[in-house]
C-alpha cells in the first residue's frame, strides 16, 4: 500500500489514546489479507478489493501501535468491522484516501471516523435525505462564514461518524433524521444531538456526541470519540490523556 502518512487529517482530530494510520490511496495491488478476509472479497472488483485491503492494513498498523494482535478484521452486522477483544475502532475509505482509528476499550467506549471528497452531494434528493430542514436552512450561512467547504457533504460525513460511533454502543440502526447537527465552522467542531434515546456510557445516558472536522487535501474528514466506558468495581480510573461500517444503501 502507499506509505502511511504522519500528521494526516485523523491525527489532528482524535485524542492521544487513539492510534491512527492513514494513507492517500493504494500502491499497486495491496496485499496482506487473512484467508477469512480473502474469502470476503473473492468476487469483488479490483477497486473494492484494493480499498478493503489497504484500510485493513491501516487498521492493523494502528492496532500494532497499541500492542494489539494482527488479526482478521471481518465486516459484521451492518458492515461494522469486528475488532479483537479489548479494542474499539473505526475505518473509512474514499477516493484517494484510507484511514483507521483504534483505541483500547479501557480508554474509549467507541470511535467513529469518516472521510469524503470535498464535493457537493450528487443531488438535492440525496441532500434532503441526509439533512434535516434546520440543517438545510443553515447551509447558506455556513458557506458564507467559511467558503470552500461543501457543507452538505460535511454534514453527511459527520452523520456517518455519528452512526459508526452509535452502532457499537447500541447495535441499533440510526437514521439520518435521528441526529441533528450544530456546527461551529471556525472552530472545526460539531455536536450531534440524538433525537432518539441515546446509549449509556460510564453510567450516563448520552444525549449527544461531540466531534471534530478538518477540510484539507481535497477531503472533508470527521471524527468522534466517545467514552470512557465504566470501569469494573474497585478499578482505579486511568487519568484522561487529553469501529468502516458505512450505512447500507447510501453512497453519494
Image: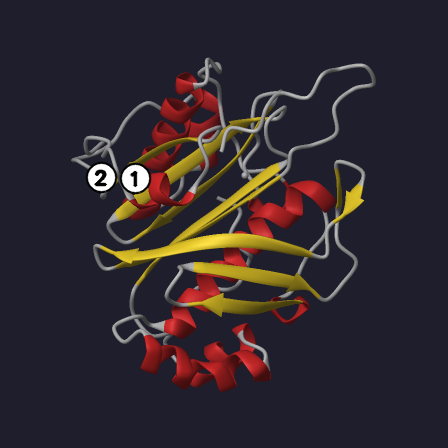
Please provide percent x and percent y for residue 209: 61, 53
- Quadrant assignment, res 23: top left
- Quadrant assignment, res 174: bottom right
User: What is the quadrant of the N terminus in the image?
Assistant: top left
**Residue 190 - label:** none
Q: Residue at x 65, y 63 (%)?
A: 193
Q: Is residue 45 visible?
A: no
Residue of label 2: 26
Q: Under tag 1, what secondary structure?
A: helix
User: What is the quadrant of the C terminus in the image?
Assistant: bottom left
> In the picture provided, is 84 more to the left or to the right than 71?
right
Please provide percent x and percent y for residue 180: 61, 69
Q: Residue at x 48, y 16 (%)?
A: 68
Pointer 2: residues within 10 angstroms few (<14), some, or many (20+)?
many
In this view, the mark in front (2 or 1): 2
Q: Disc 2 or 1, which lies upstream in sequence?
A: 2
Q: Residue at x 40, y 85 (%)?
A: 140
In the foreground, 107 or 76: 107
Q: Residue at x 40, y 26 (%)?
A: 62
Please provide percent x and percent y for residue 114: 43, 51
> Against 224, is 103 above or below?
above
Q: Under tag 2, what secondary structure?
A: loop
Q: Is residue 179 visible?
A: yes
Asked if marks 2 and 1 touch (Cβ < 8 Å), the reply is yes
In the foreground, 162 or 189: 189
Please provide percent x and percent y for residue 103: 52, 28
Residue of label 1: 50
> Against 163, is 85 above or below?
above
Q: Whole-Å distance between the Cαs marked 2 and 1?
A: 7 Å
> Against 183, is 105 above or below?
above
Pointer 1: residues within 10 angstroms few (<14), some, or many (20+)?
many
> Against 210, is 38 above or below?
above
Amino acid at each position: 500500500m502507499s506509505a502511511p502518512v504522519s500528521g494526516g487529517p485523523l491525527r489532528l482530530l482524535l485524542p492521544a489514546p487513539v492510534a491512527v494510520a492513514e494513507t492517500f490511496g493504494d500502491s499497486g495491488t495491496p496485499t496482506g489479507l487473512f484467508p477469512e478476509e480473502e474469502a470476503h472479497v473473492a468476487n469483488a472488483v479490483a477497486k473494492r478489493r484494493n480499498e478493503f485491503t489497504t484500510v485493513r492494513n491501516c487498521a492493523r498498523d494502528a492496532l500494532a501501535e497499541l500492542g494489539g494482535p494482527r488479526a482478521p478484521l471481518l465486516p459484521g452486522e451492518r458492515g461494522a468491522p469486528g475488532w479483537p477483544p479489548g479494542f474499539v475502532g473505526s475505518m473509512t475509505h474514499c477516493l484517494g484516501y484510507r484511514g483507521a482509528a483504534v483505541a483500547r476499550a479501557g480508554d474509549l467506549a467507541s470511535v467513529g471516523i469518516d472521510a469524503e471528497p470535498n464535493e457537493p452531494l450528487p443531488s438535492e434528493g440525496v441532500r434532503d435525505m441526509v439533512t434535516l430542514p434546520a440543517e438545510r436552512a443553515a447551509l447558506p450561512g455556513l458557506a458564507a462564514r467559511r467558503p470552500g467547504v461543501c457543507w452538505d457533504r460535511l454534514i453527511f460525513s459527520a452523520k456517518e461518524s455519528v452512526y459508526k460511533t452509535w452502532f457499537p454502543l447500541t447495535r441499533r440502526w440510526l437514521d439520518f433524521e435521528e441526529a441533528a447537527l450544530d456546527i461551529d465552522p471556525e472552530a472545526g467542531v460539531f455536536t450531534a444531538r440524538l433525537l432518539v434515546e441515546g446509549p449509556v456510557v460510564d453510567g450516563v445516558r448520552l444525549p449527544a456526541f461531540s466531534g471534530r472536522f478538518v477540510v484539507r487535501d481535497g477531503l472533508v474528514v470527521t471524527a468522534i470519540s466517545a467514552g470512557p466506558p465504566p470501569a469494573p468495581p474497585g478499578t482505579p480510573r486511568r487519568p484522561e490523556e487529553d469501529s468502516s461500517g458505512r450505512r447500507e444503501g447510501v453512497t453519494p
